[in-house]
Image (cartoon, grey):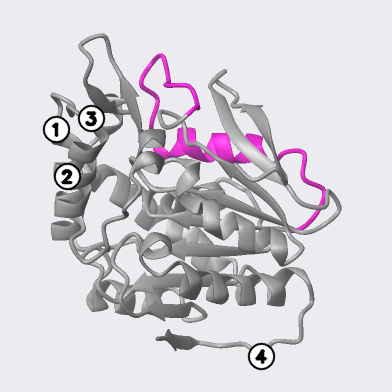
Amino acid sequence: MTNRLQRKTFVSPDGVRLVGDHGGPIDAPCAVLMHGGGQTRHSWSRAVERLLDAGLQVINFDARGHGDSDWSPGGAYALTDRAADLAAVTADLRVPFILIGASLGGATSIEAVHEGLRPAGVVLVDIVPAPDPRGIERIVGFMHGHQGGFASVDEAAAAVAAYNPQRERPSDTRGLMKNLRPRDDGRLYWHWDPRILETAPAIHHAAVARAADTLAALTDIPVLLVRGLSSDVVSEAGVDAFRRQMPRLEILDVLGAGHMVAGDRNDAFNDGVIAFARRLLASDPLSSFTSINLK
């Protein structure tokens, strides 16, 4: 963790503690980062550094059931629960803020706006109201897999590489330990609450589709969709349907990136998102865009 960040704990209305990192000038506009399902806040590490360099305040937190945050005692993992978490995380902000959510984090952003949160803008990272079911099935299959754990971190890295073969396998796998925990049997297990997967994806998608109608109607909230052009979750049909629902939708297409856009093409992702944030939050005189291809 960068020494420009301080660890902070937020408490959701139902008592679940959410652990995050907070940094940057307290009076600066804020970027609130939300990772995807099965990830942790550490997936944003390089993005956080760039956002801080851009002069923004940053909040980056582990979702309930993930990372250092609490697992819900009652298995409360609906999008409404996650939206309440986000409201708690942003409750003390007295500056404009944007929401940057990857996959599950993006769905949480949409639901939170539906329930009354009013950010200055929303960045949805490889998530649309109608995702490709084949990509979703692959994600769920990966999260359901390896329930017997791993003998070593290298074995876990091999599983990740098999899921995402287009990404270069890192030579140093120590960072992966942030997503793993040892148990008494000596094996390593993914550190997320298995009850997260008890709700069928179709139920979440129906909730997102309903909530997206609210976001579409709030024309004063700019929305940027960051899409990995190699993603199997966001298809061209899904993008077209979202555009029809929200004609003002801005799109950032990132070549060479799959569903894990920030991890696959971190620099391209950061450049596009920071440009969007500056335009909205820092009154930067950048021209508006409706579609960008970063090579």
User: What residue did someone put label 3 on?
Assistant: 198
User: What residue did someone put label 1 on?
Assistant: 146
Where does the image place residue 73, in percent across and percent down from the top left? 41, 14
Image quadrant in which the C terminus is located: bottom left
User: What residue did someone put label 4 on?
Assistant: 287
Spatial distance from mark 2 to mark 1, Cα to Cα?
Answer: 9 Å
Q: Which element is circle 4 on?
A: loop
Where does the image place residue 78, in percent across and percent down from the top left? 38, 34
Spatial distance from mark 4 to mark 3, Cα to Cα?
Answer: 44 Å
Among numbered discs 2 and 4, the one appearing first in the sequence: 2
Among numbered discs 1 and 4, the one appearing first in the sequence: 1
- Residue at 47%, 75% (x, y): give it: 268
Among numbered discs 1 and 3, the one appearing first in the sequence: 1
Q: Amino acid at mark 2?
A: Ala
Image quadrant in which the N terminus is located: top right
Q: Residues within 10 Å of mark 3 (few under 14, many from 20)?
A: few
Q: How many marks?
A: 4
